[in-house]
Amino acid sequence: MIEQINQDSDNFFWEYIKREVPKLVVKAPTWSIGPVVNRDEAEKLISVLTKWMLGNQPDNVLEDLEKLNNPPTVCGHHFSAGEATYTCLECAIDPTCVLCQACFRRSEHGNHEYRMHSSNGGGCCDCGDTEAWKSGACCSLHLIDNEQNTQDVRSLIGQDLRRRLQDHIYVIFKYASDTLALPKSDQVALPSLLQREEESNDSATVVYNDESHTYDYVIKKLSEACKCDNKKASDFATIIDREGRSIVIQGTTQSCNAVKQQMVKPDGYSMESRNSKPLQTYVFPINVVAHQEFSILLLSWLTTLSQRCEIIRLIVSDIFVSKETDKEECILRKLMVADGRMWKGARNSYFKLIMSTLMLNMEMKKDLSVHYTKLYAKLMEDFVDDDQELNVSIMCLSVQLFTVPSISLYLAEHEHLLEILLTSLLIACCTEVKPYENAAGHGTLTDDDQINMVLDKKKMKETLHRFANVFLDLKYALGTVPTEWTDCLKERFLKFFNLYVKMTGCFEGLDGIERKTDRHLEQEPEWQTGVTVHMRFVPVIKYMMNWCESSIDVLLKCLTLTIHRLSLYYAQTDSALIKVPYGSKEYQIVDWDITKKKVSVHYPLSRLLAALLVTTSRFDSITPDQLLSLFESPDQLLAMSDRSLRALALCAQTMASAWRRNGLALVNQVYYSHEIRCRPESFDRDLQMLQVCSALLNDSDRLFVTFLQRYNLITPGLNFDKTHIVALHEELVDLLLYVCFERYDSYIACVDFKEIARREIIHVLASGAKPHSRIYKLLPDSITDVPEWEEVLKDVAEFCPTVAVHNVAKYRLKDECVLEVNPHFYHYATPNDQTNAIDETCKRRKAAKQSHVFVPRPSPPFKNLWKKALNILCCHTFLYYVHSLLHDPVIVDEAAKSDSSDKLLEKVLYLIGSAIVEERERVKKNLSDPFNFCQRAEEENIMEAMRQSVDKPSFSNNKDMVCWIVSACDDVQQRRLGVSQDDSASHDDSFEVAPRPADDLEKARLRKKNAETTRNALLAKMRSQQQSFKAKHSVDLDSIELEQASVSALDTETEDMDSSAVDVNMQPVCFVPRLQIAAANASEVKDICILCQDSSKDIILVLAAYVQVSSVLSKDRSSSKPFEVDACVDITNRNGVHVSTCSHAMHFSCWTEYYEHQKKQYQYRSQRRLHNRYDIDKNEYDCPLCRRLSNCIIPVVSQHCITKVRGLLNAPPTFPTVSSSNEPNLQSEQMLNSMEFLNRLDDTTASASFSAEENEAANNLLLLREDWVDASDTIPPASSPVPPAILPAAVEEPVVLMEVGGDDFEDILPPRPARTSTTKMNYKTSIKLAFEEMEKCFNSACLGLKPTDPIALQQDKCLLVWRSIAYTVQSLEMISRFKKEPIMQDPTIRDQKTLTGITRSAFLKSRLDQVSKSKREKMMRLLVGESDGETVLLTTNIFSSMVNLMFAADSLLAANKSKKESERSTRAIQNDRNILHLCTVAQIAQIMLFIDVNEITTSDAICDSDLIRALNQIRSYAHFEPLTNVDDLKLEACVKESFAPFVRSCTLLMRYATGVEPDPILKSSDDMSVMLKYLDLPTDICDILCLSTDGNTLHPAIQKWCSHSIIVKSNPSAADTVSNPKRLFPYLSSASLLVTLENDYSDVMEKASEFKCPRFPVEDEAIHPTLCMICGVILCSQVRYYQIFSH
């Protein structure tokens, strides 16, 4: 058969595929979801094709081919989503050069500064690529050996095999490309070679993925169309999202079309369906789908072969890029063009093949890049029309190709790469092309000059988010700067630059705005698009300037092009000049008033000119005259710089609140122009433009007058008031400071990188310590892109490590760097940042006892090209302006001064001081330096005004600064005269306040004396008024004193009675009725509704709470049993109900209205596809005040109400307790009481011998006969068949439960205030409704039940609340134990409100619900040693069982009215005490029974003690083997360690259940004896276990509990039982901790990247797994409902 195949291989393949692939289809009903191709059968078909291509023994052939592989020199590892990648900050050419984890660990870069990232998928490892690294290009696995890699392995095989491989692989490629490139259409048909004579009539409805519809919408549509449940629809939606499409139904064409019509049918009520396109749904023949899925499998098979054999990889690469002919089409081109029609799975299949073949060979990669560049415009157009993300599109190849230096330069020179990229971007921005207007006077315009592109903002806004990738591609293409310029490359770049200048001109003046003076702007204009485009262009301009900087010829030509293009724009808009008078002269400037004409913050073309001009400083051969010669005249330079000045003036006037009526759009644009992402190409460029203009223009007066005119300080704008004028003066002074002294730029001044980085970091940290991440974000990219900035950070800041878990480590500015802070630094983003920096600096200076005066520091010298920039400080107009400010009434007149005036004066003085410091630094180097500010200031009488203002009150706040300025000016003048000065003692960085004159000291002494006299006079007046008031109201004051004395006496009497009832040395006991009554009568802080603030409403308050099922405390996670409502909780505390609240209370009626509003808002946001923080379907909502997520309410009940409900207000004031002085006797008495308690419980609940009907009757009868026996009851005689206390109650009437709102319930409620509102809801109905809502929320959150579900109606309605009490208490106890805090430490308001709310609600809910007596009596039988199914008391979590038993006993007691209220109240307390004592005994017995023997035994010591004897006695009850080598110290420590959490939890519970505060000593430390006394228990463990005082008799209940068959079978020594260490103490009582992660976080990322979804495994998918920090299980976060069903 092989011979026949070789003879006609192509026909064999097509016939075989055409015949066999349709047989792979899995049809309904076998198919339900997922691929329709049977994977097992498909593998068999692929094995046949393997033999067809390689022969009858393909494995042997592959092994032989694999032996011919050259040693690998390139890694090429394809990254999965979430996989760790590494980039070396010292050696990488750019940040896109990365290594995989294996290569990084075997490279030298681990010792360098590196950065780790999480890959988005799609990239490959650059190990072995010499162009990606400055050094260390290879790891130890991929060392380059040129001698071993020169041979072409394809020459080592025979021609027949080579030709066969080429032919067969090409056929496979053609088949895959033909099927995958089929159009998305219902009329799609297979290629002719695959069509059969008898085609199947079966079809399939296929739904494609898009980014326009939400998960919920797709699930809803699938549920409706396919008539399936939400789970199956969710699975469909998951496959659609992961693979890009999914078959949702297969069958006849008619049925598939019906489903399609339902899928594309819009919902009239859904905003999502109205605002977006319908779901992409098509009906394909089933054979088409089968061939497409099989093609993906074939491409994956080829990928595997290519990775294994180098020969196959090279052949696949040759076929991929083979040239197109008339008969054969280029496979790569065909697949790329069809990329937009493919889905995610198909794209990944061929993309991975490209990464495994073409990307591993430089020549092949260059061929790929050529094809990709030629198709770029088409691919980008398809990418824009599509809505898939970049990582699943062929467009992600850009980062792999354009970042390779040799390839990017080759493409730029020979394939017009830069022009193609920019042309693609122009499609998104411009549509119209028209000639320039008013261009006369600019010579003859060429055809190119006639083209004036017009911006289409609407189109740009719609497509910009898709074209954003072009900006990145431009950045990659320009990232490699040419070292040698060829004529061709120069020509290509200049064409690109000319096109860029044209496009940039479209944005000149974008979003222009006119000042509103009459009324506020009615509608905010759209501004986000312009800012977004600006941000995108910032890195492009940076790299483009690097290209211009590399050649002086290119730079000057680009500068000429920009000036020429800008002159054309200038001719259209602002070419007129006007004369403006200032002082005694007139100055000619550009006619433009920003308060009357349109102005914008977007002038990219003018700023591009600024960037080119400052770049010329890199070349020493360029002179100022040469630069000026590029302009037609100095007027043209001034006009072109005017737009930068307009933008700065607009920002200044906006800061001065002069444009308030223009709305927030302008405010946002101004903010972003100073924001760090936009600042380099906006604010910074504007300042550079003014600095260049100031340096090149000889007429500085004209420039300064232009400043004044743009700021409207010569002719104030309409509606400008005094505040506006003062603020504008401040802004202008700031501008002068920035233009003249902000020179920390290597293009402007002689400064290196470390000096620039140092200054930026100092001012970032000036406002306070910050973490590293925050510092990184606040620094410009020009600094953070250089790894050395970290060293600068360490030089200027000290590292402050974290001191708490919730804190972060920060960097704090060093003390010696505080003096370098400039209060007028130009890179403060907002005025608040500047204020915070000044305040923090002043605090630091004050603490260090340094001067509070900010003395200007020297600035780095200008470069020679810009050294004349400071001439503006010596011009007449500037000095006249400063002189006028110093004599302005706003500053001089004390009555007219304000805070703004002081700020203005401070800035003016700082400007003068900075000029003096500048001159002093220049004079130090050259006594004849032309910068003579001090002389000019003397000539203009500025210094004279300064000397005269020293003693003026208006200058009092700045007196020290004025003195320093005068002194510094004198110092400079002395230097000019040649008088020698000691530079070390000159006025440099420090400032020392000169001694005050004697008259100043005398004035200060007089002011202090006058202040003291005034204070004494006021105190004397107050004393006189007090005496007068006492004399006038003496009678009333006497009565008040008598009343206070009587109250004090009553309190003293009460305290005496209390001390007589209980010993003064006795600690508080929670079971003392008097203490419970006192706690109930104590006043509580009344909550106020956060919604209505009305305290008079007669409606119950509720707390916003969050309820959830939790397994955080579980000690054994081997069982995946879901949460169930069970009275018996497993010993491992597998899961429970946790409750938390934010402590904010609302009236139930207010909450109901608010919740209804939340529902409507949720529906509104869902319809508009807006993000919702909560899910109404889960009863979730946000707290109205703190916005904390909630899903439940907890009624607010007072302790007085609970005490009255339980009848405790009528209880005896006290009774004997264990904590009294006669402890041994009372201990024995309590033990007898607990035994009597168990006997009565056994008698009254025994019903095993009754029939079903008799059983219920007996239960009712026994319940009516007797409650629990308290301490005052005597033990009945043994001969008495029925206790006397039982007989009178035997004939009582049946129990009638209290109805909500009935008279009985009305009696137990506290008195309510009279209702003043007219609401229909009253207090009774609100209680009922609130508890019903609480029950509904618990059922929904914990069980997913609705109120009408049968299960919800049958279950015990109180069990969930009781379970939540136990679990929440245990959670808080474990948290405090982890934090090593006392359990009774003052709790947070949230914890306090949570425990108070759920505990009190549980007592009240037991009286509102129908009591299931049989279930609760069965629960009580656990205490007498019976089992509940397969559970006995000692196999449960004792604390949880105790909580259930206490509340169950309380509900049963409340249901019985056979006793008087006083007796029921006493028995309620006694029941609590007896149950607590029995459960404590059970807890100790459980610890001893299930203790880890390895923790207490020893091999070299045999000890004996009471505790050891008790241990063996308890083990003997359960038929466990006795232990003979027990260390008593280890045993005691182990028992106490395991017992302590139970005691702490009981203490916390009883504090909130009884309201009795424990001993205050527990707030500072946990004292076991104090807690046991508070619980009315003996302080010794053996005393708790023993029944008699001699300690020889254990409590009889222990034998009942331990001798049960369930306990006996749990013996670890039994042959059929294996001991589980997770069910032993002390592990069971230990704190649950988070899982321990690997030392290297990259190991965690690698583990996550290897994770495959167990339900829907898809190759190369962005699964984004989630690691559970509790149990360490990795889950797939994208599969809906997976956590519910599997975790």
Image (cartoon, helix red, strand yellow):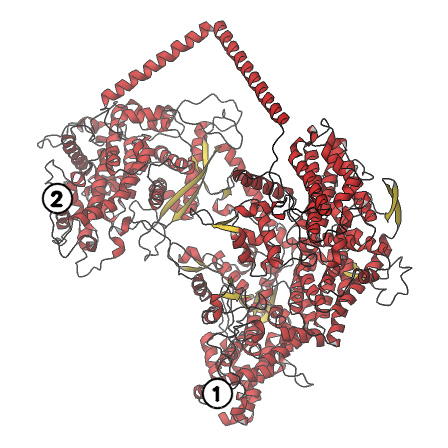
Quadrant that contains the C terminus:
bottom left
The location of residue 1490, given as percent across then percent down, is: 21, 51
Give the residue type that dot 2 points to.
Asp
Residue located 64% across and 64% down the image: 472
Residue 42 visible in the shown view: yes
Q: Quadrant of residue 14?
A: bottom right
Disc 2 target residue: 1506
Q: Toward the viewer: 753 or 306?
A: 753
Q: Which mark is residue 1546?
A: none
Q: Toward the viewer: 1153 or 1476?
A: 1476
Vertical comparison of 139 with 907: above or below: below
What is the secondary structure assignment of the residue under circle 1? loop
The location of residue 460, given as percent across then percent down, is: 72, 58
Residue located 36% across and 14% down the image: 1047
> Which comes sooner in the sequence, label 2 or label 1?
1
Q: Toward the viewer: 1185 or 1356?
A: 1185
Image position of 1118 (left or right of 1243): right
Give the residue type that dot 1 points to.
Leu
The location of residue 357, given as percent across then percent down, is: 55, 79
Residue 778 visible in the shown view: no
**Mark 2 residue crowding within 10 angstroms, few (<14) / some (14–19) / many (20+):** few
> Over which residues does the magenta segment extend?
1085-1095
**Mark 1 residue crowding within 10 angstroms, few (<14) / some (14–19) / many (20+):** some
Q: Which mark is residue 68?
A: 1
Q: Quadrant of residue 605?
A: bottom right
Q: Toward the viewer: 1652 or 474?
A: 474
